[in-house]
Amino acid sequence: MDIMSLIIFLAIGALVGWLAGNLVKGSGFGLLGNIVVGIIGALLGGFLFGLFGITAGGLLGSIIMATIGAVILLFGVSLVKHA
């Protein structure tokens, strides 16, 4: 992975984390938190969508899938946190 791919990967992770934070919590988590939430959400979304045989179609599909995974992640964390 070259440096440009890494920068794009981190930027998409930050975008996805920010989107999920705004949808679930109402605000973001800072740059590093958004990147972590976005990356873990992308892994979770890819796994869950893969169980149903659904693949992301291009960049927009990947962002949508990762955002859904990050929202599920944040929802699950909030359930555990309030229990």
Image (cartoon, helix red, strand yellow):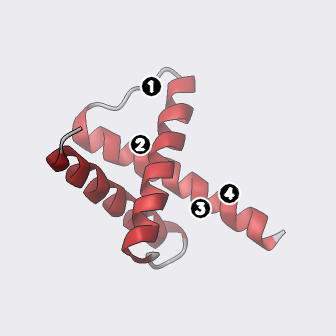
Name the mark on residue 54. Answer: 1
Judge from the rendering whether residue 74 lies leftward or rightward of residue 3; answer left or right.
right
Query: Do callouts 2 and 1 mark residues in contact (Cβ within 8 Å)?
Result: yes
Residue 2 coordinates in the image, percent (x, y): 18, 41
Question: CA gap, disc 3 to disc 1?
Answer: 22 Å
The residue sitting at the left extreme is: 4
The three-letter amino acid code for the residue at tag 3 is Leu
Residue matched to label 3 = 74
Q: Earlier in the sequence, mark 2 or mark 1?
A: 1
Q: Residue at horizontal 49%, vertical 41%?
A: 43
Residue 10 coordinates in the image, percent (x, y): 30, 56
Mark 1, other Cα within 10 Å: few <14 / some 14–19 / many ≥20:
few
Q: Earlier in the sequence, mark 3 or mark 1?
A: 1
Residue matched to label 4 = 76
Question: CA gap, disc 1 to disc 4?
Answer: 22 Å
Question: CA gap, disc 2 to disc 1?
Answer: 10 Å
Question: SS at mark 1?
Answer: loop
52 over 21 or under it: above or below: above
Query: Do callouts 3 and 1 mark residues in contact (Cβ within 8 Å)?
Result: no
Viewer-nearest residue: 37 or 83: 37
Residue matched to label 2 = 65
Residue 12 coordinates in the image, percent (x, y): 29, 54
Q: Residue at horizontal 54%, vertical 68%?
A: 24
